[in-house]
Image (cartoon, rainbow, N blue to C red):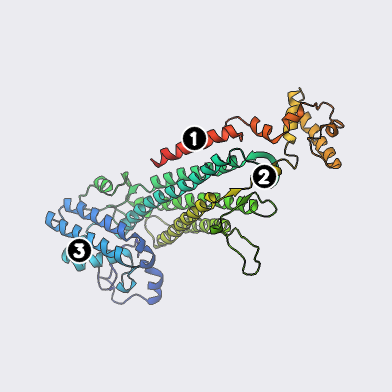
Amino acid sequence: MAGGEGGSAGAMGGAMWGGMFEGGAEAVFRALNDSLPFDWRLVQEDVRGSIAWGRAIASAGVFSEAELAEVVRALGAIGEEAAGLGGPPVESGAEDVHTWVEQRLIARAGELGKRLHTGRSRNDQVATDLRLWAKSACGTLIEAVALVRGALIDVAEREAETAMPAYTHLQRAQPITAGHWALAYEAMLARDARRLVLARESADACPLGCAALAGTTLAVDREAIARDLGFMRAAENSIDAVSDRDFVLDLIHACVQCATHLSRLGEDLIIYASAEFAFVRMADGVTSGSSLMPQKKNPDACELLRGSAGRVLGRYAGFAATLKGLPTAYNKDLQEDKEAVFDAVDRTRACLVLAERVVAGLVFDRERCARAAETGFLNATELADYLVSKGVAFRDAHDAVGRCVRHAMSKGVGLESLAVIREVEPRVGDDAAAWLTVARMLERRGALGGTSPVRVREAAGAARSRLVSERA
């Protein structure tokens, strides 16, 4: 029962709360109740928290220095024992990770093991364990995000001059560089990293010492406990501390945003790798073939990125729905937090690792991209800007170019055919030709945040400097 109310082990065998119960728990109840198969992941955090609690209650007179040393030694050995196990020891009969640690402590330290839980509840114990785990998970995800960002910056630097079409409504819009496209996703992931930093801050409050809900009676220094465990602060309200799972939602939400961005990246690459576009080729190691069609090279990795976003979003929606109707303080519904956050973090991290491999292996077909950027009237806005430079109001220029496009389409030519365009808009001079080349269109987008090759190189350098600073 990860996070359930309980005192010392009693007549229920593997339980910590058996004193007033005569019969054993129903098998169907235990099947739903026992959480050791999934909360085993918190075993090292539980050992750390137990050592910190031992030190705290020793200061309050529960243990002598020698007794504390024995408890700490035994807990350290339990941590090593747990690390050597291949999986959760369900054969132990322990209902949760806290029970297992206490069982092993009693086996190793006898009566001292029974005294460790003095003044502590599994409510503040599990909340502490999960916060420790969440902080570590945020750090792991931030580093995984950094690797994808680095790969995108590599693409931006390498493809700073590679022209390609940009799309709105999946219709060709204006030319950009492939480097600019890559930096758009780097910007999204940079925000994801900041959200993970905030999620880590959300988890950075220590509930230990809040007991079941009203606080402990022992004279412990909760701020010292927080420092001992590496928390920034002690949780301020004991009722809120044992039932607050906002930090779990914050972490899953950060995962949702990140998974959503990876899904969009995957969707772009699925489109760009299709025969109809053929802008990029993906490495063999992140694609698959067909059991029937020998010619197929399927972008399965990107489809997995896209599909995983729905799974992570489902974890957020499911756990938010669990929280919405809970009354004050601890309720067993909160046990749903672990599988939700564990799965969201695991899937997001796996997607990040995969995304880094996908991006690192991309090869842009520069000629194909350039040809696509030259067709489809992507220079229409440029022609409107040209007319504006001649003193035409933009709205009038917009209307005039629309008529030019319609006329050019009817003749089967592009806007570069100035003689044809002048049949509709005589104000277009020979000097318009310089405005309508892809290279000139890119060059003119030199404002901050624009797609000019110069700006893309500057932006890539700035992004790399930020990334290095953040990782430091």
The residue type indicated by label 1 comes to Ala
Q: Callout 2 environment at 10 Å: few (<14), some (14 to 19), or many (20+)?
A: few
Q: Is residue 207 left or right of residue 358?
A: left
Q: Earlier in the sequence, mark 2 or mark 1?
A: 2
Q: Assign a secondary structure to mark 1.
A: helix
- Amino acid at the residue labelled 3: Gly
Left or right, 418 with reference to 270: right
Q: Quadrant of residue 444?
A: top right
Is residue 27 depicted above or below 361 in this figure? below
Residue placed under numbered mark 2 in the picture = 367
At horizontal 72% and vertical 32% (from top left) the residue drawn is 382
From the image, state whether disc 1 or disc 3 is nearer to you: 1
Q: Nearer the viewer, mark 3 or mark 2?
A: 2
Whether residue 179 sits left or right of residue 63 in the image: it is right
Q: Residue at x 61, y 60 (%)?
A: 298
At mark 2, the secondary structure is helix
Q: CA distance from mark 1 to mark 3?
A: 55 Å
Q: Nearer the viewer, residue 470 or 260?
A: 470
What amino acid does circle 2 point to?
A: Glu
- Disc 3 on helix, strand or loop? helix
Instruction: Determine which residue is flagged by label 1.
Output: 462
Q: In the rendered image, which quarter contains the C terminus?
A: top left
- Mark 1 or mark 3: whose residue is earlier in sequence: 3
| Side of 53 where 268 appears, left or right | right
Numbered label attached to residue 113: 3
Indicate whether 50 appears above or below 189.
Answer: below
